[in-house]
């Protein structure tokens, strides 16, 4: 049976060593592996201000496109920055559905940072992702021509409004 070379490749999840994402990515690039590590923007509260930082969507893991029949498993397990490939039970490497990786890649920008979905409408329930109101849940009240959305949410027992760009919101 002849198999297409592309069909032989699968996506796997690689567990990273602590704080070794950059090292793993450098070594995967050097070895010629295609890899994908989706990131997301997060707002954290500091002592006196809010800061926006970019963190991994799946902390401690990276997806790698590899051919399990060609000895890539041993190469990946020996790659600096990678602890091991994720497997369950009998030691067989677990694969990640290609469709899931494709959907994630389509939702990311050129820096692999997750973007908000483009289809928000009046009346949609949303979560605010960044800024002083991060993690608040509200409802889209209006959408202006400049793509700013007015969000109605409950703040300290009162209905409040805030205008913000669509990329700072996540549809629920």
Image (tube, helix red, strand yellow):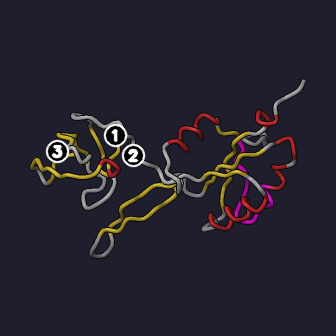
Give the quadrant of the N terminus: top right
From the viewer's side, name the closer residue of 33 and 97. Answer: 33
**Mark 1 highlights which residue?**
171
Rounded to the nearest angstrom, the CA distance separating label 1 from label 2 is 8 Å
The reply to whether callout 3 and callout 1 are in contact (CB within 8 Å) is: no
Give the quadrant of the C terminus: top left
Query: Helix, strand or loop at disc 2?
Result: loop
The residue sitting at the left extreme is 158
- Residue 99, magenta (yes or no): no
Q: Quadrant of residue 27?
A: bottom right
Query: Helix, strand or loop at disc 3?
Result: strand
Q: Residue at x 19, y 52 (%)?
A: 163
**Mark 3 highlights which residue?**
152
Query: Helix, strand or loop at disc 1?
Result: strand
Q: Residue at x 48, y 43 (%)?
A: 107
Q: How many marks?
A: 3
Q: Quadrant of residue 84?
A: bottom right
Residue 31 x/y as whole percent:
79, 59
Q: Residue at x 62, y 51 (%)?
A: 36
> Magenta residues?
76-88
Please give left or right for residue 49 compared with residue 89 in the image.
left
Rounded to the nearest angstrom, the CA distance separating label 3 from label 2 is 19 Å
**Mark 2 highlights which residue?**
116
The reply to whether callout 3 and callout 2 are in contact (CB within 8 Å) is: no
- Residue 80, magenta (yes or no): yes
- Other-residue count near label 2 (Cα within 10 Å), few / some / many at <14 / 14–19 / ≥20: some
The reply to whether callout 1 and callout 2 are in contact (CB within 8 Å) is: yes
Tell me if residue 85 comes above or below residue 28 in the rendering: above
User: Which is more N-terminal, label 1 or label 3?
Assistant: 3
């Amino acid at each position: 049976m002849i198999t297409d070379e592309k069909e032989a490749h699968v996506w796997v999840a690689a567990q990273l060593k602590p704080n070794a994402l950059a090292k793993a990515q450098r070594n995967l690039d050097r070895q010629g592996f295609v890899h994908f590590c989706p990131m997301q923007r997060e707002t954290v509260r500091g002592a006196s201000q809010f800061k926006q930082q970019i963190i991994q969507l799946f902390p401690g893991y990276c997806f790698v496109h590899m051919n399990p029949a060609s000895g890539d498993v041993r190469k990946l397990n020996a790659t600096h920055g990678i602890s091991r490939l994720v497997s369950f039970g009998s030691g067989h490497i677990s694969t990640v559905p290609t469709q899931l990786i494709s959907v994630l890649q389509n939702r990311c920008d050129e820096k692999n940072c997750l973007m908000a979905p483009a289809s928000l409408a009046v009346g949609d329930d949303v979560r605010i992702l960044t800024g002083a109101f991060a993690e608040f849940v509200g409802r889209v009240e209006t959408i202006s021509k400049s793509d700013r959305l007015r969000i109605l949410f409950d703040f300290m027992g009162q209905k409040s409004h805030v205008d913000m760009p669509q990329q700072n919101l996540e549809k629920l």
